[in-house]
Image: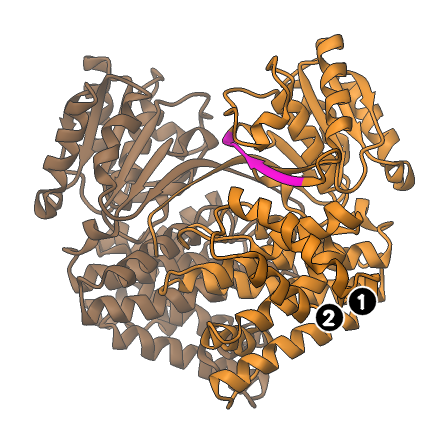
Chain colours: A brown, B orange
Amino acid sequence: MENFVFQNPTKIIFGKNTVSSIGEETALYGKKILLVYGEGSIFKNDIYSRVVQSLENAGVTSIEHSGVCSNPLLSHVRTGINLVKKNDCQAVLAVGGGSVIDEAKAICAGSLVQHDVWKFFTGKKTLRKALPLTCVLTLAASGSEMNSGMVITNEEKKQKFGYGNKRLFPKTSILDPETTFSVPPNYSAYGAVDAISHLLEFYFTTKVSSTPVQDRFIEGLVKTLMESCEQVLQDPFHYQARANLMWSATLALNGLSSAGLGRVGFPMHMIEHSLSAIYNIPHGAGLSIIMPGWLSYHLQKDPKRIYQFGRRVFGLHNQSDIKGSELTVQLFKNWLKSINCPTSLHDLSIFENDFAEIATNALSLAKIWRLHKYEQKTIETILHLCT
Amino acid sequence: MENFVFQNPTKIIFGKNTVSSIGEETALYGKKILLVYGEGSIFKNDIYSRVVQSLENAGVTSIEHSGVCSNPLLSHVRTGINLVKKNDCQAVLAVGGGSVIDEAKAICAGSLVQHDVWKFFTGKKTLRKALPLTCVLTLAASGSEMNSGMVITNEEKKQKFGYGNKRLFPKTSILDPETTFSVPPNYSAYGAVDAISHLLEFYFTTKVSSTPVQDRFIEGLVKTLMESCEQVLQDPFHYQARANLMWSATLALNGLSSAGLGRVGFPMHMIEHSLSAIYNIPHGAGLSIIMPGWLSYHLQKDPKRIYQFGRRVFGLHNQSDIKGSELTVQLFKNWLKSINCPTSLHDLSIFENDFAEIATNALSLAKIWRLHKYEQKTIETILHLCT
């Protein structure tokens, strides 16, 4: 295990009928807040009215900032920041999935500075303070509800960049699995895939050899994400499956699964970010295509590790490392197909003549994320394996 | 999964050469502190001098309160509280294992009130504020370094009672595995057993049926604790084994492994507390005796669950639930023997004619811990299975 510092102060309120606590929790940080949400899904399941009622009961006034889209846009973040400044909001409440929470974090970051918020993402400025954030999560996927990171797309520059800072941990996040009952099958599956991708990035990019605590934690979460995703696709109202999916997705990226693994990278996310920046595809769909391709590329480098994953997650045994690792990637790809996720760029009508452009876009991120061994050619090779 | 609230704000600084951060971390909370430690083991490994040097570098003055024993005593806690009050200490620093940290927590709790600290343990008073606490952990065992609980023995009343409150989370805990190199084999093993016992209490007393996240987390930690304990007994200077043991023990009782399991109980600890209150035996040694006995008693009630544990931790397969669960308990008992821990009360010269007294003592705790189904006769039956 490598040296690490771990601290995660977010308060999680998990379970049935917990949405009504949001007013009380938010009132701790401000009586006038910006309420951030997406394109209307929170009007299903009565979530919106329960949130507004709870805020009212707690004496909290809200200014609404709606219309956050998936792969949230910098221009929309800027509008939110202007709203906060104009109305002197003291806190931000995000009601939605990872995109809504990420945009809310960007608003929290940009509201207390005079310069443009994008400067945090390009490394030109460091965050020193941020507005407090509370969340009601409505999609099991990104883990943003219990971490300090965010990803925003600069639509002018076609850049999808991330930034993290300890001041961006939500103060409180409410996780009521029932709020996810209305998530359609494809997005439920994309969410599970997103959470799995976070775990696989850690598992397969660590260079530390003795990490049994983290390995088993990750393997257990992946198994639970797979099982509960299957159950949710069978029955969208399966409470326990929704609950297990939700809590696993949160734990996948709250800092614990990577603590002790040393410097890990996000090469699969790097390539996916370019895909969704250029084609605006759902993040989970992009990851579902990139993961098996990246693992195939990674096969020669670390068959032992991939086969360990195959033994412990897929129950493989009695194979050589090479054969076992190949089978592992195949089984994983089959599973992604079984939950109706795309596993080839061709599935999304992205063809070989675009690969150079995608790779060039990814390269700009490779520099920022210090993934120096990913050159133009490497990325193109991986893209060819994603077909 | 059951509804839960989870929040754990403790900052963990983990790894080699981290002890020297303690001055800086502690200075955040006070410039005059009470330094709590045990019976001298911190003079080995140079821990004491490194701590004192680090405090000095950070401009922190300390009043020393040494001599904390295992199963820390109320009278000694009271002495510490008097020292804090007399010297106007602003914070407490614990350097040691779970006993030292628990005593330090009790001092933090009792220093800001006029009444006796024991009233928190008997439920007569509720904690509203506490002094800030920082820790340097030197024993992988109790998990106290990242939770809000403590256990203190009232030697006059022969009561070993626990109390928990969110104000008792350490602010920062430093976990340097090298500080545990000098822990002798028996105490290394007792520490692993202690951590395993926390996980087994959760695993076998939950009444919630769908808990795959928690089950796999617990199973993974138990496997790692077992493996790394064996490695440590082979080679006390095996850094990775010490590291894995240390982090697993912390994670075993930081709130995460039980979040979502509903109301869990500590029946094995209840009986062990009586043993160590009466005989002053090491906590881990007592647990090593009680666990197989309690599991044997529990066999008829929940063979399915015990066999799940046996399949996933010991690799059992192709057994009936009954046979599989019996084998699981046997394998676990064998493992405890293999690390030279006692597995019978007779090993510690505790015999049948004492069982009534032990059970009576445990009963007083059963009431406080709301373990109502544990009557005198039940506890005596379990004690007979612990031979």
Q: Nearer the viewer, residue B96 or A3?
A: B96
Q: Earlier in the sequence, mark 1 or mark 2?
A: 1
Amino acid bearing label 2: Thr
**Magenta span main SS:** strand
Please give the name of the residue rendered at 51% of the width and 49% of the height, measured from the top-left corner: A256
Confirm or deny contact between disc 1 and disc 2 (CB under 8 A).
Answer: yes
The chain under label 1 reads B
Please give the name of the residue rendered at 74% of the width and 60% of the height, measured from the top-left corner: B241
Please give the name of the residue rendered at 87% of the width and 36% of the height, measured from the top-left corner: B39
Identify the residue position indicated by label 1 in the image. B346
**Callout 1 secondary element:** helix
User: Was residue B86 drawn as part of the magenta stretch in this picture?
Assistant: no
Residue B387 marker: 2
Q: Is residue A154 visible?
A: no
Amino acid bearing label 1: His
Q: Nearer the viewer, residue B232 or A125?
A: B232
Q: Nearer the viewer, residue B364 or B62?
A: B364
- Highlighted range, magenta: B160-166
Quarter of the image with the C terminus of chain A in it: bottom left
For the residues marked 1 and 2, what is the alpha-carbon distance in whole angstroms? 6 Å
Against A228, residue B366 (above or below) is above
